[in-house]
Amino acid sequence: MTPARTAPEIYWRTRARTLARAVNAGWWWDRLTPALVGINLTAAAALVLYRQMHWPVLSWMVGLGVAWLAAGLWSLRQARTRFYADAEGLLRLETHLGWHNRLSAAAAGGAAWPTPASERIDPVRWRLQRTSGPLLFSAVFLLLGTFVPVGSGAKANLPPPTQPPAALRQVETLIETLKEEKIVEPTALQNWDERAMELRLKPSREWYGQEGLEAAEALRDQMSQEADTLGKNLAKAAALANAMAALNPEARPAEMNGAMEAILSNLQNGGLPLSQALAAGMASVANLTPEQLKQLAQQLQQAAKGASPGAGSTLSSLSDVMSALGKNNGGGAPSSAPAQGVMLKGQAGGGGDGQASPFISTGGVKGEYASSATALTFGTPTDLKANKVEGVSNPNMNAPVPGETVGITMRGSSKPDEQQDALNGPSGGGQAGAGGDAVWLQDLTPQERTVIKRYFQ
Amino acid sequence: MDTAPTPLPLAVDPAATQLAARQLGLLRQAVAHVIFGQEELIDLVITGLLAGGHMLLEGLPGLGKTELVKSFSKALRLDTKRVQFTPDLLPGDITGNPVLQEHEGQRRFVFQPGPVFTHLLLADEINRASPKTQSALLEAMQERRVTVLGETHVLPEPFFVLATQNPIELEGTYPLPEAQVDRFLFKLEVNKVSTEVLQKIVLNRRLGEEPALAAVLSREQLMEFIALTRQVFIPPVVANYIARLVSATHPGGSQAAQAIKYGASPRAAIGLAAAARARALLQGRPHVGADDVQAIAKPVLQHRLILHYQARLDGLSTGDVTQKLLAEVPVEEKPLPRTMAAAKVS
């Protein structure tokens, strides 16, 4: 049976145990501090990220707490190999007191327990400054992570957009209009609809990305251009139908029917082919009565406005139509020469608000320029003197204004004049170089110009 | 009524140890009256006697090694014999020889004990005798008996050998082998005295005149003290310290052991414990402390360590290495954490 402990023994064993626990706490703190510093620094960086991404801070706090707890347990396990038992506590006490291991001998039964000390005994002292520095440093970082201003990463957390880009909505509106007005062939309209739907079905967050916006705008521009062309052609057809209705069937020139056929051909071959109902009406103009022609003209006019609100026609009178046919131009009967195109620099799809002439001009009605590359030849074509190149006045080739003709491109069977001096730039009444040459002619240095000039001499 | 629990009886009565300490203190004072300026040496010799070990004294001639032994002999009333070791000394001259005697018409061999049959044997310049003679003495030291012609003769108790050797006259000597040096508990260095002590010697000594010294203790008392020494308690922490200290003397056991080729043996550990007990008794304590071990570590260990040749060329001595070991091996096996420090004793 173990003998009961005396008071001095209880006293000294208690003191030893207290000291051992303090030392053990020191060992645990020794192992814990580096882990805490590392966790705090990592948590500070994570907190900045959380704030930037507007993630819930509660989860960060929970994670930090878990990390602290894990660090505490891990460091406890690491420190246990260094922990003091009561015997080590006694040893520290007696070493501090200079008692020649008396306490250890007493604990082993080889000596008497000394009387309890009346004064406080502190065999060890804390040196927390060794570990508090890095810990405070990491705590400062945590505070910085809490209060430092962060950039707006809120974009990532904004609710997704509910409406597609305006360009896409415009395309869908135009498609709806064309469907309701039954202007375009449904199968062709379905193609455009599918393309629009493909963009709409993309994730909403991608609508307003660079690619999404560009795709929507490209689709809108393309469809707008086709609709504008459709509208203009319909306006032309409407004007022509009106003009035909104003004339007696016997007095109608045959070319009017041909012109209507040409317009119909353009309408059926475009990106928005005309519906069959309207096409059938246009195809039978030769057989229509004036009232029917007026009705057809109304339908075409309405369709033109539906396709392109700005595509109106100013040719409301017969004289306008006749003028458009080139009868008062003095240029002779329009030839049936191959279509000629006038390439305009700086001019986009055109399409004003009805000011542009719907007919190709050889000088232009009222000096206006055509906005469409579609060529019409009827009546007595104007002799364009295709074998000659008629220059236009453009003294400054380097800075043409939009809409200004800088050259004329020859198409068809006409051959260019080989004797033509390609170096002579466009001048009033003089010869002009090919329109496309103006592009590279500008880039030649004076020395290069001299060489080429000498070559062609 | 609550009564305080009765403590267990201790191995050693503290009163007995204190009484022993007082009487041993008288012995110390008595010898110090004759041998001036060697208090530490006197303490170590008493410690060695209490531990029951033999001692090797190393010092220059004329420092009082022989006088020291004689003083102890007188103070303890022990039978003392002195043997001057020379190269021609035979083993029989140490242990004794059988002598042919005639008695009543019959001849027989009668053993004549040698000088080893004494309490205190002063073996002067032991390194001058041949290895064979050294072995005879060392065997007697170890076994405490002598066997001649098949007959074993036990040496008297107590039996101590205080051997001396001269560190400078190495020509014509036979250095003791390490294995036999290990049988000495202590190797004590007798250092020269200070000028003040020398002056005192000059004033108090006459050439050829032996100083008077009265007996302080009897042989029986010494035997009691030796028995009491063996009962002095060694706490487990101190035993652990001794073990760690001896282990640290081996190559790889510590930083200081880098200079050591061969370390101390378990006999050294036993010697440390015995000498520590003796010192504790000398201090009047019934238990050993780590400071006791530290006080006697150098005389116990320094002659048991064999240094590397390079270390010896560098001028390192075994005493220096022992001091380094004591500084490197802490008493507490488990250190304090970084966030703590041992408080200074006020």
Image (tube, rainbow, N blue to C red):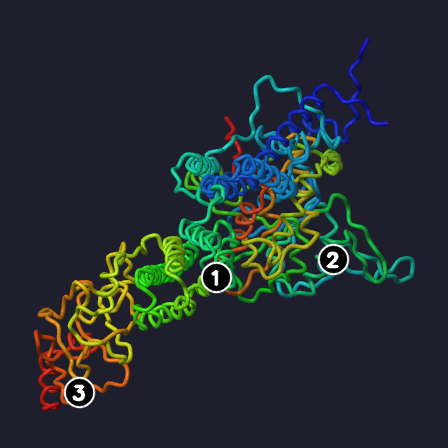
Q: CA distance from mark 3 to mark 2?
A: 138 Å
> At 58% across and 28% down in the image, what residue appears?
A97
Q: CA distance from mark 3 to mark 1?
A: 47 Å
Q: Position of residue A65 (x, y in %)?
A: 58, 36
Left or right, residue B194 beside residue B43: left
Q: Amino acid at mark 3?
A: Asp
Q: Are marks 3 and 2 on the same chain?
A: no
Left or right, residue A113 beside residue A44: right
Q: Quadrant of residue B13?
A: top right
Q: Amino acid at mark 1?
A: Ala
| Of marks 3 and 1, the one in the foreground | 1
Q: CA distance from mark 1 to mark 2?
A: 139 Å
> At 56% across and 60% down in the image, what residue appears?
B307
The local secondary structure at tag 3 comes to loop
Q: Which mark is residue A149?
A: none
Nearer to us in this view, A393 or B334: A393
- Visible in this render: residue A4? yes
**Residue annotated with mark 3:** A417
Q: Which mark is residue B139?
A: 2
Write down the chain letter for disc 1. A
Nearer to us in this view, A170 or A160: A170
Q: Position of residue A249 (x, y in %)?
A: 34, 66
Nearer to us in this view, B115 or B166: B166
Q: Position of residue A77 (x, y in %)?
A: 65, 42
| Quadrant placement of the N terminus of chain A | top right
